[in-house]
Amino acid sequence: MKEVDYIIVGCGLASIAFCEQLRTHNKSFVVFDDNSQKSSIVAAGLYNPVILKRFSEVWKAKEQLELALPLYTKIEKELKIKFDYKLRILRRLNSIQEQNKWFTASDKPSLEAFLSIQLIKNINPQIDAPFGFGEVLNAGRVDTQTLISGYKALLINEGFLQEATFQHSNVQLESSIILYENFRAKQIVFAEGFGAKKNPFFNHIPLTGSKGEILTIKAPDLKIDYAIKSSVFVIPIGKDLYNVGSTYNNEDKSNAPTETAKEELLSKLKTFIKCDFEVINQVAGIRPTVKDRRPLVGRHAKHKNLYVLNGLGTRGVMIAPYVAKELFEFIENNKQLDSEIDINRFG
C-alpha cells in the first residue's frame, strides 16, 4: 500500500493549481481523473480583470493575477511548452453613452490599472464598430487544453496520475487515515467541477452548473491579433482561427454541443463581423457555477480530512491559483479561509 499526503480527485484548473501548492511544499500526492469533466478543457481561457458588461472590476482581480501569472510562467518553464498568451481585449462600444461610461469607469482607482483611458478607433473594414473600442489592460489567454494535457503528461511521468474513475463508495475513513484502493492518505481534495453532483460527501454544495458552448471559426479576412468583446467574444488562436463564445444555459446539463447554441452564437457574431467565415468546430462543457458567483472551498462538516475545491465558474484561469493557495494554507497552517469562498457560508 502506497502512502501519500493527499489524494486529489479531478485534474482541471483547480486541481493543477493545488498540485502546484503540494509540489512547492514537498507534499506527496496522487491524482485521479477520468476526463469526464470538460469545462476546463473547453474554456475560452481568458484572464480578464474587468466585467465588460458593466465596466466593473472582477472580484479580487489584482490578488488573483498576482498569483496566477507567475504560476503559469513557472509551469510553462517546467513543461517547456507555451500556453499563456498576452492578449489585448477590445470592448466594442455601442454608443456615445457607452464611451462616456468607459471614461467614468477608467477614472476609478480600482480600475485604472485595467482600463485604458484612450479609446481606439476601428480601422478594420471587416468589423462594424462605429463608436470604437475601449482597451482592457493586463489581460491574456491561457490555452487550457495545452496546459491540462501537458500537466497530465508531467503527472504521468512522475507516477502521480491514475487515469481512472474515482469510486467514492470505496473510500474507507479510519480516524486520521483514508484508505482508497492501494493508497493510504492523510487528506482527500475533491476538485471535480460539476461532477461533484455525484459525490456523496459533497453533493449538498449549491452548484447550479451553467452549460457553455464555444465555436471555432476560420476567417482568413478578419486579420485581428486581439480579442473583441461585443455580444460575444471573438478570440484569435492562430492560423486565421478564432474562438467565438460563449453561451449560458442553466437547464441542459450535458456536454453535447447543440444547434440552438450554434445559431445563437452565429446570430450575435454577424451583428459586428462583416467577412465570410467557416465554422470548423463546436465544443460544450458544464461550468461549476454558484448562485453568489463565488467559489466553494472548505472542509466536510463531519469528516475532517475531506475537502472540496470547486465552483470556479467562468473565470477558472484567474481564480484557481488563489483558491488553491487559500485551501492549502487552511489545511496545512490552519489559516482561516476567506469567508466569501468558505462553503460554510451556506450553512
Image: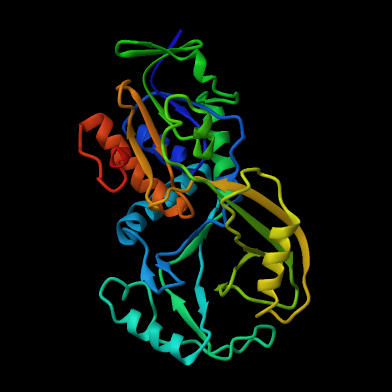
Q: Considering only vertical position in the picture, is 268 above or below 347? A: below
- Badge count: 0
- Horizontal and vertical percent for residue 331? 27, 30
| Residue nearer the viewer, 289 or 139 | 289
Name the residue at 74% across, 78% down. 221
Q: Is residue 22 left or right of residue 180?
A: left
Residue 146 appears in the rendering: no
Q: Which quarter of the image is occupied by the C terminus? A: top left
Q: Residue at x 55, y 28 (%)?
A: 157
Identify which residue, 198 or 321, lies in the foreground.
198
Looking at the image, which residue is at 60% across and 59% down?
A: 247
Q: Is residue 120 above or below residue 186?
A: below
Left or right relative to 96: residue 295:
left
Regarding residue 58, the answer to whether it shows in the image is: yes
Where in the figure is residue 282, as x and y percent of width and height?
72, 55
**Figure colour scheme:** rainbow
- In the image, 220 versus 53, the foreground residue is 53
* Residue 21 in which image quadrant: top left
Q: Residue at x 60, y 30 (%)?
A: 34
Q: How far across and down, in percent of the image, does residue 244 sit?
A: 64, 64
Q: Where is residue 288 drawn, in percent x and y?
A: 49, 45
Measured along the vertical axis of the image, is residue 179 above or below residue 222?
above
Above-or-below relation of 170 to 210: above
Along the viewing direction, whichever of 26 and 131 lies nearer the viewer: 131
